[in-house]
């Protein structure tokens, strides 16, 4: 077992622009860290540098106590699970699991023991003699996991392993991956663009944007105190409302009402962030309540999402399922739950 | 085509039947002619019904050969053809799969140039470069030898190109998974690429075997010793006698015998052949 340390890691594919830059990250031994961000932000690039499938242009990557910049993937003591599973189509499941061990000259009895154990853990014993093409997507996913487990590596690397599965199976497998990782205690680095997956799996989240780290932290910390407007918009579902506003004297005026944001902030243009669930319906005459004309309502069963707009900005508000909603809604927000970001840089101000 | 229209069905079958007849008729003529006596052709008419000699001509061709035309017994020539066809087929497959492997999976200087040079040789079949090739083979002392028959025909741009296309359809992740699993280049080639191109190799083998078997100009040019005659050139020699009438019954018997090995290969490997052409096992 070992941790992974990235210091000043950067990657340039063309020698000019950096696809990923200045990444500093320490994954502790046994920790489950999820890299999350929109498409093209460099998640896969970063993971592949750790795996050794891409050269490292800047900085160092260490696994355990060893700098592995120049070490072949096979010698890094990692196992990787790919999005399309990448099982060897001409080999049976058993051979797929055993291939990496055979190449390491492990003796037959030990290979058989490990394959059987992995098969038991993942409940794929029945399919051991089938070819991958005779398996369903979920079963292939398990085999791909099995191939990683049998190696008993220092770290697991996952690149969007669930995105080829249907929604329901994805939720099931997500839980299984989490349980398995807890049980094995293997350091894991996991890439996804799905923020729900990221939130539910991670011990710690790394939010990437345009090749840079936006924020690193425990899922709930990131959710409660996003470090930037980008993170605020990315993490959480439904997404946080981000409204351009002008701050003067610690309050913001809009929609015919006003919100106290708190003291100690400089006057000027800001982006005000309010999560849909933090918007509270209020009486029309309540002090500072602002009005939102309702455009349409999404029923989620457990709650209703009311879509409307305030001063031309789309706003979403989550209200309890039974609550009736008229043509417009009066809302207030608790100052403690507001997020204030710099209008230009998007950095958090409060 | 689930429609059931009698007229179109009839038309389609008619075209197919005509096609089959056109292909099969010469074969039929050859078989018929081989059962006649040598004098039955003097009239200039080709008989259309079986003669009375049965398999005599075949027996003669296989045991004694046709001394008047300087043709040794067919067995030896068939063996030469077999060696040449197998040599060409296996040689081409081995060389082209290796060069495709190099071109697709290795970054070496002038890689693109190498690929295009191989590609351009598509335009230079044996017939075009036959004199320089002859000179080289002669200088190497390979006239009248199996290597001389086989080696100059082995390089194949077509097969290289085919394997390149096959390799390009193999997902990058598979290559990466193998890398992580500790498979070096040669292990990857042996354990992953070769098994995955098995059906393509089989299809190619059928085509190349027939190509090698049917070679005419090259063996004609470099074999002067009857020990190395191939069956196709042998037939030509038989039909080309100087001072007498060709003995068509014997020639046709030889033709029919020469057709058999390719037929056996095609029929025997039909399943793999079709599979290799239509579906990739990926
Ligand atoms: N082989 C490559 N050559 C050149 N540029 C590349 C290469 N691979 C990725 N890139 C670029 O690097 C950037 C990051 O790509 P990367 O694949 O890491 O994104 P990602 O975060 O994994 O996205 P996704 O969620 O779509 O998989 C992108 O702008 C991409 O165009
Ligand atoms: Mg990716």
Image (cartoon, helix red, strand yellow):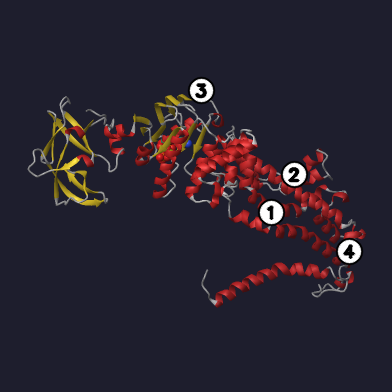
Q: Which numbered marker is on residue A66?
A: 3
Answer yes or no: are tags 1 and 4 on the same subunit.
yes
Subunit that carries the residue with mark 4: B
Give neighbour class at mark 3: few <14, some 14-19, many 20+ (Cα, 10 Å). few
Closest to the camera, between mark 2 and mark 3, is: 3
Instruction: From the image, tell me which residue sits under label 2.
Output: B152
Q: Nearer the viewer, mark 1 or mark 3?
A: 3
Residue A182, placed above or below residue B257: above
Separation of residues labelled 2 and 1 (CA atoms): 18 Å
Q: Are marks 4 and 2 in contact (CB under 8 Å)?
A: no
Residue found 22% across the figure and 41% down from its top:
A277
Disc 1 is placed on an element classified as helix
Binning the other alpha carbons within 10 Å of mark 2 as few (below 14), some (14 to 19) or many (20 upward) gives some
Q: CA distance from mark 4 to mark 2?
A: 34 Å
Residue A316 placed where, x, y %? 22, 44
* Residue A284 visible to an observer of this rendering: yes
Which label lies toward us, 2 or 1?
A: 1
Residue A71 or residue A113, whichever sits in front: A113
Image disc number at residue B207: 1
Secondary structure under tag 2 reads: helix
In this rendering, the label closer to the viewer, 4 or 2 = 4
Asked if both marks, 4 and 2, belong to the same chain, the answer given is yes
What is the C-alpha distance between the residues marked 4 and 3?
77 Å
Q: Nearer the viewer, mark 4 or mark 3?
A: 3
The image quadrant of residue B210 is bottom right
A52 on left or right of A40: right
Q: Are marks 4 and 3 on the same chain?
A: no
Q: Quadrant of residue B155?
A: top right
Is residue B129 visible in the rendered image? The answer is: no
Find numbered disc 3 in the image and state the secondary structure of the residue it sits on.
Answer: strand
């Amino acid at each position: 077992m070992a941790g992974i340390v990235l210091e000043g890691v950067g990657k340039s594919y063309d020698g000019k622009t950096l696809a990923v830059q200045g990444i500093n990250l320490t994954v502790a031994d046994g920790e489950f860290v999820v890299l999350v961000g929109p498409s093209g932000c460099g998640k896969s690039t970063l993971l592949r540098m750790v795996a050794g499938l891409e050269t490292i242009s800047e900085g160092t990557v260490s696994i355990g106590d060893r700098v592995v910049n120049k070490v072949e993937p096979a010698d890094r003591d990692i196992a990787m699970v790919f999005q399309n599973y990448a099982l060897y189509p001409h080999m049976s499941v058993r051979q797929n699991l055993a291939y990496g061990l055979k190449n390491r000259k492990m003796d037959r009895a030990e290979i058989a023991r490990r394959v059987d154990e992995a098969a038991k853990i993942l409940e794929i014993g029945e399919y051991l003699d089938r070819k991958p093409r005779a398996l369903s997507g979920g079963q292939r996913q398990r085999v791909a996991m099995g191939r990683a487990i049998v190696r008993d590596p220092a770290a697991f690397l996952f690149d969007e392993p669930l995105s080829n599965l249907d929604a329901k199976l994805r939720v099931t497998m997500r839980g299984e991956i989490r349980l398995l990782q807890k049980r094995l205690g293997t350091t894991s680095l996991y890439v996804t663009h799905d923020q729900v997956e990221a939130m539910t799996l991670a011990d710690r989240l790394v939010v990437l944007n345009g090749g840079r780290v936006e924020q690193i932290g425990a899922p709930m910390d990131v959710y409660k105190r996003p470090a930037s407007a980008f993170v605020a918009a990315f993490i959480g579902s439904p997404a946080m409302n981000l409204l351009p506003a002008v701050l003067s004297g610690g309050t913001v005026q809009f929609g015919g009402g006003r919100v106290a944001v708190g003291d100690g902030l400089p006057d000027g243009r800001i982006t005000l962030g309010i999560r849909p669930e933090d918007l509270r319906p209020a009486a029309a005459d309540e002090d500072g309540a602002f009005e939102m004309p309702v455009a349409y309502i999404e029923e989620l069963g457990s709650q209703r999402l009311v879509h409307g707009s305030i001063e031309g900005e789309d706003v979403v508000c989550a209200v309890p399922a039974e609550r009736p909603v008229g043509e417009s809604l009066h809302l207030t927000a608790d100052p403690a739950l507001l997020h204030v970001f710099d209008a230009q840089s998007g950095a958090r101000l409060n | 085509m689930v429609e059931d229209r009698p007229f179109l069905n009839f038309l389609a079958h008619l075209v197919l039947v005509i096609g089959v007849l056109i292909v099969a008729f010469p074969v039929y003529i050859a078989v018929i002619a081989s059962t006649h006596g040598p004098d039955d052709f003097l009239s200039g008419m080709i008989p259309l019904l079986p003669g009375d000699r049965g398999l005599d001509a075949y027996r003669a061709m296989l045991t004694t050969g046709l001394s008047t035309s300087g043709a040794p017994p067919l067995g030896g020539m068939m063996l030469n053809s077999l060696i040449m066809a197998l040599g060409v087929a296996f040689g081409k497959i081995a060389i082209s799969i290796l060069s495709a492997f190099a071109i697709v999976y290795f970054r070496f200087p002038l890689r693109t140039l190498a690929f295009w040079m191989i590609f351009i040789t598509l335009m230079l079949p044996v017939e075009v470069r036959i004199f320089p090739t002859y000179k080289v083979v002669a200088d190497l002392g390979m006239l009248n030898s199996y290597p001389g028959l086989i080696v100059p025909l082995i390089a194949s741009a077509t097969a290289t190109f085919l394997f390149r296309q096959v390799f390009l359809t193999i997902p990058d992740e598979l290559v990466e998974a193998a890398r992580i699993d500790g498979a070096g280049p040669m292990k990857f080639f042996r354990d992953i690429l070769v098994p995955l191109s098995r059906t393509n190799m089989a299809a190619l083998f059928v085509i190349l075997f027939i190509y090698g078997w049917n070679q005419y100009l090259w063996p004609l040019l470099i074999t002067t010793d009857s020990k190395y005659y191939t069956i196709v050139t042998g037939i030509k020699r038989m039909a080309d006698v100087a001072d007498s009438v060709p003995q068509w019954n014997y020639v046709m018997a030889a033709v029919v015998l020469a057709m058999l090995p390719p037929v056996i290969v095609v029929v025997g490997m039909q399943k793999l052949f079709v599979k290799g052409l239509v579906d990739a096992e990926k």
